[in-house]
Image (cartoon, rainbow, N blue to C red):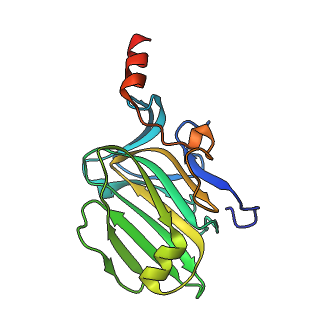
Amino acid sequence: MFRNKLQSGLISILCGSGLDPLAIWAHHGKGCIKRITDEDIQTLVIEITSVQFCTTWISLPRVPSNSIGIRLPYLTMLLKYLKLPFCFEFVVMDHRMTKRRFRASNCQTTANTNPLLCHLPLHLDEGWNKIQIDLFSFTRQAYGTDFVEIVTMEIYANTRIRRIYFSDRWYTEEELPVSYKMWKPTKKNKAKSAKN
């Protein structure tokens, strides 16, 4: 998908307020995948919900045999914790040309690693969370190999997604474009929107 494109700065793969945010994503399962306006941040987001979280998800790329092909080493996800079981997965290609899978879940309490899967516990705060992953560091620590590119990604129920993007380095909030920032409501902002 992105392998033959110039890769620098920020590459967004999902934005809830975009024109057609799930155009490049495949939808799976019997749960609900829809775009809504989140009451806390007052912007459009993608909501994925299901009674059993592992039965409903979105995946990139749409065709499983393809690869995302992003080589930028930093992954950032702006997600809302809905106080329900939640999981996401991604697969990386390492310098040995081996596909390595990472799975993060709030149902997991300990980290487990085997040669092809690293399962990590995920702690989320109530409301909106900014999850940042250093793909070089994760791949090196889990498998002792070097990250080359991201191959696939899956986001399971139950969550809301504002944006998912890759970057060439960590950016401060001040350096990010407004639509990439993790805006959190304050009492002042809440009072202002209540008056309107």
Q: Residue furthest top?
A: 195
User: What residue lies at 44% left-to-right and 81% top-to-bottom?
Assistant: 141
Q: Position of residue 57 (x, y in %)?
A: 40, 54
Q: Position of residue 87 (x, y in %)?
A: 35, 59
Q: Position of residue 89 (x, y in %)?
A: 42, 65
Q: Is residue 121 left or right of residue 140?
A: left
Examine the rendering and report whether any part of residue 20 can be seen: no
User: What residue lies at 36% left-to-right and 26% top-to-bottom?
Assistant: 187
Residue 24, above or below 98:
above
* Viewport quadrant of the N terminus: bottom right
Q: Position of residue 134 (x, y in %)?
A: 51, 68
- Which is more toward the observer, 135 or 101? 135
Count of marks placed on residues: 0
User: What residue lies at 71% left-to-right and 60% top-to-bottom?
Assistant: 8
Residue 15, above or below 165:
above
* Viewport quadrant of the C terminus: top left
User: What residue lies at 23% left-to-right and 68% top-to-bottom?
Assistant: 109
Q: Would you identify the image quadrant in which residue 174 lies?
A: top right
Examine the rendering and report whether any part of residue 121 can be seen: yes
Q: Would you identify the image quadrant in which residue 185 lies?
A: top left
